[in-house]
C-alpha cells in the first residue's frame, strides 16, 4: 500500500469517527463553570446560562414515614427549543410514586410504564413537536430527567414525589437529601450503562435550592439538627418542628442535606402503620412494623474478634476523604480490645495488605499499623472487587468473628458486581460500610452492608471518633440472629425483606407486609442471642379500613422490588419487577414516568437542541484526581444520539467517572485508532529494516501507591495495571 493511500485511508477513518455535530459544524459549547470563562482546554466557551434554574424540596415527616416532593425548574435561554437532560440524585430508598410537568398554568400528570414504552412515547412526542418529560432510574439513588421542546425564553417545572422511612439508630432519626453525584469509576471491562451513570460535572451550576421540612415526631422532640447547613428551626409545639434554610434560597451546595432529630429519652416504642382501602380490587391491606427487640447482654456471649480495616485509596479519596478515613482507622486501632486481632488492606488499582494475616493487638503492632496508614496516598482507579475479595478471602482464625470496616466514597459504576461478590463470599464475616465524604454513594454502601450482614455509617470528617465508638458499641453487643416472625392466626403474607437480617441491639427491626383480611392478635419475634433462644411478643390490630397511610403500600412495593433485585444477574426476574412497579405505580430500573403535553400547536422551530445539564461535583472531591469529567454540553439534534459530550480526557478503567462518550465516537477515539494504525505501519517498516526488537521484554517493576519507604509485609492483590487480577466471577 502506498503512502498516499495510507494517508487517504486515515483521513477517511478520522472523518467517519467524528461526531455528527462536529462534521456538520456549528458546535455550541456551554461553559463548565457557567461563567463564560475558558473551558479546561483553554478554549473560549459561549457565555450562556445553564438550563436548571432552581430545585425545591419539601419534606413532611410523620413519625418515621417521610413524604418528599422535589421540583426542578428548567429555563431555555436559547433562540430555539431545547431538550434538557439532567442526571441527579435521590435518596437510595425512595419509593418514587408520582411525576408531573407544569407548562404555564397547565399541569400534565405523568404515568408509569415499562421503560422502553415510556422512552418510545417521549421520543414520539418530541418528533411531533410536543412538550414532554421523562423520568428514568439509572440506580436506586440516581435518576435522569429529560425535558423536551422547551420554547425559547420559556420555563418548565417538573415535579416528583416519593416516600421513604427515616433511619433510626442509637436513639437518632436521620433523613438525607442528596444534592450531587460523585464521578463513577468504570472498570476496564466496562459497565453496560456506563454513559448513563457518568454525567459531566461543573464546579458551580448557578442554580438555587430551597428546602423546607416539617417533623411531627409523635412525641416530644429533644433535639433537631442539620449538620453543615445553616437552617432556621422552629418548634410550634413540643412534638413538631419546622425547618427551612436560614437565608432563604441558596446556590445548590455540593454536599448532602442531613436532617436529624431525637425524641425525649425512652420515647421510642414499637410502631405499627397500616393501610387498607375498600376500593383496592385485590382486597389487600399493607403494614409497616417497627420493633425494637429487647435482649440482655452477657459479656461471655461476645466471641473473639478479628478487625479488618479496608481503605479506599483511589484518586477520588484524595484530600479530606482520605484524611477522615485515616483518622477513623487510627482511632479504631487505638480502641481495639486486648484480645482482638487486626489487619489493614488498602486498595485502588490493586489491593495490598499490611501483614500476611491478622496480627495481635500489641503496642508494637499498633505502632506499625499507624505507621503503615500514615504512608498511604490516594491515586489510581477504584477496584473495589479486589478490595472486597481480599478482605473476605484473607486467611484468619476460624474461632474469631471477622468484622470488615469498609471505608470508601463508593464512587463506582459496577455497583451490582461489588454487591454480588460481597453476598457470595461473606461466609461468617460481617461487613460494616463507612461512607467517607460530603456526598457519597449511599446505595452501594447500604447494599454492601446488607449483603455483608452489617450496618452502614456515614461520616463527614469531624465525627470520625464518634462513629468508630458507635461501631465498637454495636459489635460489643451480641446480635439477634436466626430471626423468625410468627404472625399467629393473622392473615399476613409477603413479609419484606424475605431474608431477615441479623439485628444489632441499637437498631429496630423494620418489616413490610400485606394482609388479606382484618384481625387482631399477637406477633411473636423469635431469634437467638449468643446461641440462646429469645422471644418477644407484640399485640397488633389490622383494621378493615385505614386510609391515612397510603405510603405503606408504596413502601411494601419498593422493598419487594429491592428484594427481587438482590439476586444473581442470571436469576433477575425483570418481568416480575416490572409487574410490581406498574401495579403499584412506582419507578424502577425497568419502569419510567412520562408526561406529554397534548395541548397547543407543535414546535415549528425544527428539532430541539440537546443540552446536558452538568451535575455539581461533591464539595470535598478533587475532581482532577478522581477523573471526573468537566462537562461541556454540546447541543445537537435531539432525535439522534442520546448524548453529545465534549470530554477533556475520556478513557476507561483508570479513574472515577472515566468513560468514553457514547456513540457517535468522540474525536479522541478516532485519534487513538489513527495512531494505532500509524504505529502498525511504523512497526512494519522497522521490522523490515531489522531495527525492531521483537524479543521478550522485561516488565518494569510497579512502585507501590503508598510511600515506597513504608513497611510492606503483606500481599498484593491484582486488578489493575501491573497486577494479576484475582479469580473473581460476579453474577
Image (spheres, grey):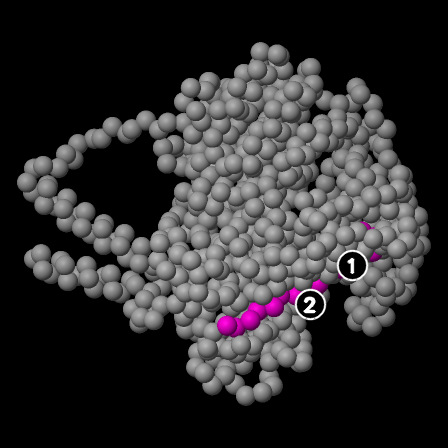
Q: CA distance from mark 1 to mark 2?
A: 16 Å
* 596 w.r.t. 256: above or below: below
Q: Give the residue at x 73% y 61%.
A: 58
Residue 640 placement (x, y as % from top left): 41, 71
Relative to 214, is 448 on the left or the right?
Answer: left
* Label 1 vs 2, first from the N-terminus: 1
Magenta residues span: 61-77
Residue 526 placement (x, y as % from top left): 83, 38
Pick whichever, 159 or 123, lies toward us: 159
* 501 w.r.t. 139: above or below: above
Q: Which residue is mark 1?
A: 60
Relative to 57, is 2 on the left or the right?
Answer: left
Pick whichever, 263 or 278, lies toward us: 263
Sort mark 2 into few (<14), some (14-19) or many (20+) by Cα contacts within 10 Å: some
Q: Which mark is residue 622?
A: none
Secondary structure of the residue carrying tag 1 is strand
Secondary structure of the residue carrying tag 2 is strand
Q: Which residue is mark 2?
A: 98
* 542 w.r.t. 327: above or below: below
Amino acid at each position: 500500500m502506498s503512502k498516499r493511500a495510507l494517508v487517504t485511508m486515515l483521513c477517511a477513518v478520522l472523518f467517519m469517527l467524528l461526531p455528527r455535530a462536529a462534521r456538520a459544524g456549528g458546535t455550541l459549547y456551554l461553559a463548565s463553570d457557567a461563567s463564560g470563562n475558558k473551558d479546561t482546554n483553554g478554549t473560549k466557551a459561549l457565555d450562556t446560562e445553564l438550563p436548571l434554574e432552581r430545585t425545591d424540596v419539601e419534606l413532611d415527616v410523620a413519625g418515621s414515614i417521610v413524604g418528599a416532593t422535589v421540583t426542578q425548574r428548567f429555563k431555555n435561554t436559547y433562540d430555539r427549543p431545547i431538550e434538557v437532560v439532567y442526571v441527579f440524585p435521590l435518596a437510595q430508598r425512595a419509593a418514587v410514586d408520582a411525576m408531573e410537568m407544569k407548562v404555564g398554568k397547565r399541569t400534565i400528570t405523568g404515568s408509569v410504564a415499562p421503560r422502553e414504552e415510556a422512552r418510545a412515547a417521549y421520543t414520539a412526542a418530541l418528533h411531533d413537536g410536543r412538550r414532554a418529560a421523562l423520568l428514568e432510574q439509572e440506580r436506586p439513588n440516581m435518576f435522569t430527567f429529560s425535558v423536551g421542546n422547551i420554547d425559547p425564553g420559556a420555563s418548565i417545572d417538573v415535579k416528583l414525589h416519593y416516600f421513604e422511612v427515616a433511619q433510626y439508630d442509637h436513639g437518632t432519626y436521620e433523613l438525607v437529601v442528596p444534592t450531587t453525584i460523585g464521578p463513577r469509576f468504570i472498570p476496564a471491562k466496562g459497565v453496560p450503562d456506563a454513559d448513563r451513570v457518568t454525567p459531566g460535572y461543573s464546579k458551580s451550576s448557578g442554580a438555587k435550592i430551597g428546602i423546607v421540612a416539617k417533623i411531627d415526631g409523635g412525641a416530644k422532640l429533644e433535639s433537631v439538627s442539620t449538620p453543615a447547613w445553616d437552617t432556621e428551626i422552629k418548634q410550634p409545639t413540643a412534638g413538631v418542628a419546622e425547618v427551612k434554610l436560614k437565608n432563604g434560597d441558596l446556590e445548590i451546595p455540593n454536599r448532602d442535606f442531613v436532617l436529624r432529630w431525637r425524641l425525649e429519652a425512652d420515647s421510642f416504642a414499637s410502631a405499627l402503620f397500616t393501610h387498607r382501602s375498600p376500593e383496592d380490587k385485590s382486597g389487600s391491606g399493607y403494614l409497616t412494623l417497627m420493633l425494637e427487640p429487647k435482649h440482655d447482654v452477657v459479656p461471655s456471649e461476645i466471641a473473639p474478634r478479628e478487625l479488618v480495616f479496608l481503605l479506599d485509596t483511589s484518586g477520588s479519596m484524595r484530600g479530606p476523604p482520605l484524611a477522615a478515613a485515616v483518622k477513623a482507622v487510627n482511632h479504631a486501632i487505638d480502641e481495639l480490645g486486648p484480645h482482638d486481632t487486626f489487619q489493614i488492606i488498602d486498595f485502588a488499582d490493586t489491593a495490598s495488605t499490611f501483614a500476611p494475616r491478622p496480627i495481635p493487638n500489641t503496642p508494637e503492632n499498633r505502632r506499625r499499623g499507624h505507621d503503615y496508614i500514615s504512608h498511604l496516598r490516594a491515586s489510581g482507579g477504584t477496584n473495589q472487587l479486589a478490595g472486597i475479595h481480599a478482605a473476605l478471602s484473607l486467611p484468619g482464625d476460624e474461632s474469631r468473628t471477622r468484622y470488615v470496616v469498609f471505608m470508601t466514597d463508593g464512587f463506582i459504576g459496577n455497583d451490582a458486581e461489588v454487591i454480588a461478590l460481597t453476598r457470595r463470599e461473606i461466609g461468617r464475616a460481617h461487613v460494616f460500610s463507612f461512607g467517607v465524604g460530603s456526598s457519597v454513594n449511599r446505595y452501594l454502601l447500604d447494599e454492601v452492608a446488607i449483603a455483608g450482614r452489617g450496618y452502614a455509617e456515614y461520616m463527614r470528617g469531624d465525627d470520625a471518633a464518634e462513629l468508630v465508638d458507635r461501631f465498637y458499641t454495636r459489635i460489643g453487643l451480641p446480635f439477634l440472629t436466626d430471626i423468625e416472625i410468627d404472625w399467629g392466626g393473622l392473615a399476613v403474607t409477603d413479609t419484606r425483606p424475605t431474608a431477615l437480617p441479623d439485628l444489632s441491639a441499637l437498631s429496630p427491626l423494620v418489616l413490610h407486609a400485606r394482609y388479606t383480611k382484618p384481625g387482631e392478635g399477637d406477633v411473636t419475634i423469635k431469634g437467638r442471642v449468643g446461641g440462646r433462644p429469645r422471644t418477644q411478643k407484640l399485640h397488633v390490630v389490622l383494621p378493615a379500613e385505614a386510609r391515612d397511610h397510603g405510603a405503606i403500600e408504596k413502601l411494601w412495593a419498593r422493598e419487594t422490588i429491592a428484594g427481587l433485585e438482590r439476586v444473581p444477574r442470571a436469576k433477575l426476574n425483570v418481568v416480575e419487577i416490572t409487574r410490581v412497579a406498574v401495579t403499584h405505580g412506582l419507578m424502577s430500573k425497568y419502569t419510567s414516568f412520562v408526561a406529554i403535553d397534548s395541548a397547543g400547536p407543535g414546535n415549528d422551530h425544527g428539532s430541539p437542541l440537546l443540552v446536558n445539564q452538568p451535575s455539581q461535583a461533591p464539595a470535598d472531591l478533587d475532581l482532577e484526581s478522581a477523573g471526573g469529567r468537566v462537562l461541556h454540553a454540546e447541543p445537537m439534534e435531539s432525535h439522534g444520539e442520546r448524548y453529545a459530550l465534549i470530554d477533556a480526557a475520556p478513557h476507561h478503567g483508570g479513574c472515577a467517572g472515566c468513560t468514553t462518550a457514547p456513540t457517535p465516537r468522540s474525536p479522541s477515539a478516532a485519534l487513538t485508532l489513527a495512531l494505532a494504525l500509524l504505529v502498525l505501519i511504523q512497526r512494519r517498516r522497522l521490522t523490515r529494516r531489522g531495527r525492531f526488537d521483537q524479543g521478550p521484554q522485561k516488565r518494569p517493576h510497579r512502585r507501590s501507591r503508598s510511600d515506597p519507604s513504608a513497611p510492606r509485609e503483606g500481599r498484593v492483590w491484582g486488578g489493575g495495571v501491573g497486577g494479576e487480577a484475582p479469580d473473581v466471577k460476579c453474577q
